[in-house]
Image (cartoon, rainbow, N blue to C red):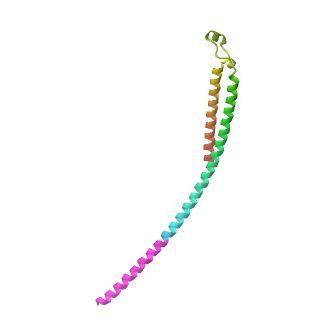
Amino acid sequence: MFGFVAKYALAGMAALLALALLALGVQSYRLKSLQASTAQALTEASEKARTQESEWQATLSKVRNEKDAELRSVAAARDAALASVRNRRPRLPEASRPACEGATGRELSNRDAEAFVGLAARADELRAELAACYRREDAIAAQ
């Protein structure tokens, strides 16, 4: 009787082992399929990110070039204005200053005019930087 039970027990164990191996094979197949689809999705996402980054870099490069051109223009205007005010007379002595009450900018001394030209140029540079910042952010937000 025990030989009969042992024979069926052995057959049952072999069947369970076969089922376990089959289940392991199915899980292995599913895992490989999942890995392949994940790798493909990762590759697609990576390429999309590279494309987006290159578009952003092109946009940023264009904005930077426009800003640099504007800053060169500001510098040229500043240099021309500084050259024109350097020929002005120096600051008036203290005794002569009351006579300039209500004077316009034409009466500014060369040092004072240079200071105002420098301030105006710095303001133009900051305006150009701010405008470039807005253009850069608007361009990236539009993409």
Q: Residue at x 40, y 82 (%)?
A: 15
Q: Residue at x 48, y 69 (%)?
A: 31
Which sits in the foreground, 60 or 111?
111
The image shows residue 142 at horizontal and vertical percentages of: 63, 47
Which sits in the foreground, 59 or 29?
59
The image shows residue 85 at horizontal and vertical percentages of: 68, 23
Q: Residue at x 62, y 48 (%)?
A: 57
Position of residue 114 relative to residue 12, above or below, is above
Instruction: Using residue 1 as the reference point, say whether residue 104 is left or right of it.
Output: right
Occupied quadrant, residue 41: bottom right
Q: Is residue 33 visible?
A: yes
Position of residue 8 relative to residue 102, above or below, is below
The image shows residue 36 at horizontal and vertical percentages of: 53, 67
Would residue 28 be counted in the magenta stretch? yes
The image shows residue 71 at horizontal and vertical percentages of: 65, 36
Q: Which residue is at the far left?
A: 2
Q: How many marks?
A: 0
Classify the position of the N terminus by image quarter: bottom left
Occupied quadrant, residue 129: top right
Q: Which residue is at the far top?
A: 95
Would residue 99 be counted in the magenta stretch? no
Chief secondary structure of the magenta span?
A: helix
Where are the magenta residues, as a range?
Answer: 1-29
Instruction: Using residue 72 as the reference point, say whether residue 28 is left or right of it.
Output: left
Q: Residue at x 63, y 51 (%)?
A: 55
Q: Is residue 143 visible?
A: no
Position of residue 11 relative to residue 60, above or below, is below
